[in-house]
Image (cartoon, grey):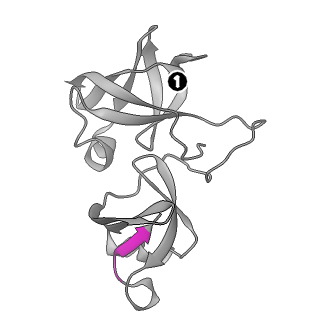
């Protein structure tokens, strides 16, 4: 489980296809503290397992489904949001985030509001029934509060979070 509060932004230094999966090496700093093989880490919101690491980077491997839903923009040089899994004995802010990506969306607008930004997103209409005002959603690993769901009864796939 994660909180949706990004600890740092990492940089992809290598990505390669291996047996149909995508192996990605990510340069990081803070999230390497206490890292072990098998550690769960959220990379732009997707829960992945560390398969190798050194003092400056770590590696994860993504299945084809994870690549399709999460990583089409993950190329060498790309920046990704990073968060270590939360500990059961720690306080946390944000929301409970599983790291299981259900779909991708398209940002339609970003508007400044007092003390926040309102981001309007279009996503799969089949997920609209799960979106409620004041509920939480995670975008690129960042936990947000839903402020509006488009259409009567939330039937439209547009929603806004801030």
Q: Quadrant of the N terminus?
A: top right
Query: Percent x, y for residue 100?
Result: 47, 49
Up/down of 70 relative to 115, above or below: above
Residue 108 lies in quadrant: bottom left
**Who is closer to the viewer here, 56 or 124?**
56
Q: What is the chief secondary structure element of the magenta stretch? A: strand
- The residue shown at (58%, 43%) is 2
Whether residue 120 sits left or right of residue 14 in the image: it is right
Up/down of 140 relative to 110, above or below: above
Name the residue furthest bottom: 152
Q: Which residues are magenta?
A: 156-160
**Who is closer to the viewer here, 145 or 63?**
145
Query: Percent x, y for residue 142?
Result: 47, 49
- The residue shown at (29%, 25%) is 12
- The residue shown at (53%, 31%) is 40
Whether residue 40 sits left or right of residue 14 in the image: it is right
Q: Which residue is mark 1?
A: 31
Whether residue 17 sits left or right of residue 160 in the image: it is left
- The residue shown at (42%, 21%) is 28
Q: Is residue 58 magenta?
A: no
**Who is closer to the viewer here, 135 or 59?**
135
Up/down of 35 relative to 141, above or below: above
Query: Percent x, y for residue 134?
Result: 58, 71
Query: Percent x, y for residue 49?
Result: 47, 28
**Who is closer to the viewer here, 43 or 118?**
118
Name the residue furthest top: 55
Please tell me whether mark 1 sits on a helix, a strand or a loop.
helix
Crowd tier of the residue under label 1, counting other residues whose Cα lies within 10 Å: few below 14, some 14–19, many 20 or above: some
Name the residue furthest front: 114
Up/down of 22 relative to 149, above or below: above
């Amino acid at each position: 489980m994660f909180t949706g509060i990004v600890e740092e932004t990492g940089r992809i230094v290598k990505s390669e296809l291996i047996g149909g999966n995508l192996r990605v090496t990510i340069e990081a700093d803070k999230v390497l503290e206490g890292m072990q093989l098998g550690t769960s880490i959220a990379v732009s919101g997707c829960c992945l397992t560390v398969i190798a690491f050194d003092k400056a980077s770590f590696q994860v491997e993504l299945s084809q489904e994870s690549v399709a839903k999460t990583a089409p923009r993950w190329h060498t040089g790309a920046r990704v949001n990073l968060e270590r899994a939360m500990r059961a004995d720690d306080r946390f802010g944000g929301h409970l985030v599983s790291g299981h990506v259900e779909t991708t969306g398209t940002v339609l607008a970003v508007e400044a509001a007092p003390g926040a930004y309102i981001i309007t997103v279009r996503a799969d209409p089949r997920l609209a029934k799960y979106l409620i005002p004041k509920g939480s959603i995670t975008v690129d690993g960042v936990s947000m509060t839903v402020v509006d769901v488009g259409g009567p009864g939330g039937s439209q796939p547009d929603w806004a979070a801030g």
